[in-house]
Amino acid sequence: VTLTFERVADAQAAKRWHALEAHVVPLDHPGMVADPLAEVEHMAFGPRGDEHVQLYLGTEEGTDVATASIWLPMRDNLENATIFLAVHEAHRRRGIGTRFAHDLFARARAEGRRRAIAFVASPLDDDGAGPPFAASLRGEPALAVFRRQLDLTSLDTATLDALVAEHVGGHAAGYEAVSWVDRVPDGLLDGAAALMARMSTDPPLGSLEWEPEVWDGARYRTREDDAIARGRRRYATGAVETATGRLVAYTDIGVSWAQPVVGYQWDTVVDPDHRGHRLGMLVKVANLRRFRTAEPASERLQTWNAASNAHMVAINDLLGFVAVERSTTWQFDL
Ligand SMILES: CC(C)(COP(=O)(O)OP(=O)(O)OC[C@H]1O[C@@H](n2cnc3c(N)ncnc32)[C@H](O)[C@@H]1OP(=O)(O)O)[C@@H](O)C(=O)NCCC(=O)NCCS
C-alpha cells in the first residue's frame, strides 16, 4: 500500500483538503465546522502575513485519508511550529497518523523549527485517541485548556443587562466602550498592538515554551488585513480611559462571512494597570450584544481558555458558555 504526503499546491488539492476537513471536524469536535473552501484557498495560496501556513494531504491508493497543516510564526517564536493533523475515521489505528506526524516534524525541522506544538482534543469524559497518540510521539502535555461554547440563539439581552448591572455597575466609571469592525481606529492602533502583545504573556502558558510576541501597529494592521483577505469579519469592542483617550482593554470575535454559523471568540485582554474595573465583562457583553445583532445567522460561539485562567473562565461562565471539550496543548521536541 502506498501512502503519500503532499503539500496542497493547486485548487483541486485545496478542494480535496477542504472536503476531508468538512467530514472530520464536526465528527471529532462537536459544534465545530471546517473552515470554508475560500479560506482554505487563502491559507494555501494567499499572500503571506506574519505567520506562514502550509497545508498537507495524506493519500493512500488514490483515497484522501488525512489532512494536516503547519503554522510557522515569522516575527517571533522562530523555533516553534504549530501542527494540526487528522486521519479519516475509517483509516485510523493503522499507523497513518504516526507516519504523517514524522513527515510533518521533518518539514518543520527543515524550516528551522525545534519545537512542535499541537492542540490535542478529547471528549470531556474520556481521553479519546489524541492523548495516547501524542504520548506515543514522545510529546509532553504543556497546558490544560477547555473549549467552551455559547448558544447564541438563546442569548437574551435582558440577561446581558442584568450581568452588567450586577457585575460591572459603577466599577467602570472613567472608561468608555468603543466598538469597531475589521480595523481598529488609527488613534487606538498602538494601544491595540500593545494589548495584543500581552496575549502571549499574560494568560497562563503552563510549561509551553512560547516567547513573548513582538507587536507594533504595522504588524497589527497586517494581522487585520490578513483576516479580511481570508474572509473573516472581526467585531471588536475596546475600553478607552476617558481621561487619556488610551485603549486599555479589548475583545474581538471573528466570523466567516461565507459561513457565519460558528463564531470564534479571539482575544480578550485588559491592561494590568486597569484590571479590577470589570472591563473584561464590560467589553465582552457590549461586543456580544453587537455581534448577535449584526450576525443573526451565527448560532454558536467558541472560546478556548486555559483551565487555570480563573478570571476569564468566571466571566465566560456568567455569560453562559458551557465546557464542551478538553483541548490540551502538547509540545514535541524536534
Ligand atoms: C489522533 C489521530 C491523528 C491518530 O491517527 P492514527 O492514524 O489512528 O494513529 P496511529 O495508527 O499512527 O496510532 C499510533 C499510536 O497512537 C496511539 N493511539 C492512536 N489511537 C488510539 C486510540 N483510539 N486509543 C488508544 N491509543 C491510540 C496508540 O499508541 C497507537 O499505536 P498502536 O496502534 O500500535 O497501539 C486520529 O485518531 C485522529 O485524526 N483523531 C482526531 C484528530 C486529532 O485528535 N488530532 C490530534 C493529533 S495530535
Image: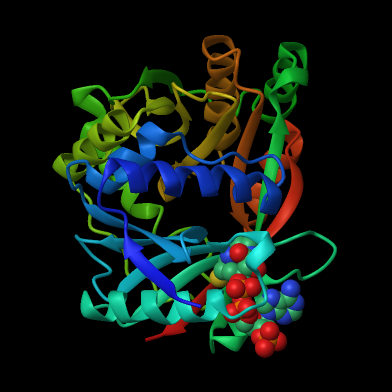
How far across and how far down the image is residue 111, in percent?
21, 74
Q: Is residue 331 above or below residue 262?
A: below
How far across and how far down the image is residue 261, in percent?
60, 25
Residue at x 50% of width, y 64% of height: 85
Q: Which residue occupies the foreground of this view, 302 or 99?
A: 99
Residue at x 45% of width, y 32% of height: 252
Q: Is residue 248 visible?
A: no
Q: Which residue occupies the foreground of this view, 130 or 300?
A: 130
Residue at x 25% of width, y 56% of height: 52
- Please identify the quarter of the rendering in which residue 334 is found: bottom left
Q: Which residue occupies the foreground of this view, 87 or 286?
A: 87
Q: Which residue occupies the foreground of this view, 101 or 178?
A: 101
Specify the color scheme.
rainbow
Horizontal side of 209 relative to 85 (left or right) equals left
How far across and how far down the image is residue 43, in percent?
31, 45
Q: Is residue 63 above or below residue 101?
A: above
In the rendered image, the residue lying farthest to the left is 218
Q: Is residue 17 visible?
A: yes
In the rendered image, the residue lying farthest to the right is 125
Residue at x 63% of width, y 41% of height: 32
Q: Is residue 181 above or below residue 80?
A: above
Q: Is residue 323 above or below residue 282?
A: below
Q: Disc count in the image?
A: 0
How far across and how far down the image is residue 250, in percent?
43, 34
Where in the image, quadrant-wise, is ligand 1 located? bottom right
Horizontal side of 325 relative to 280 (left or right) equals right
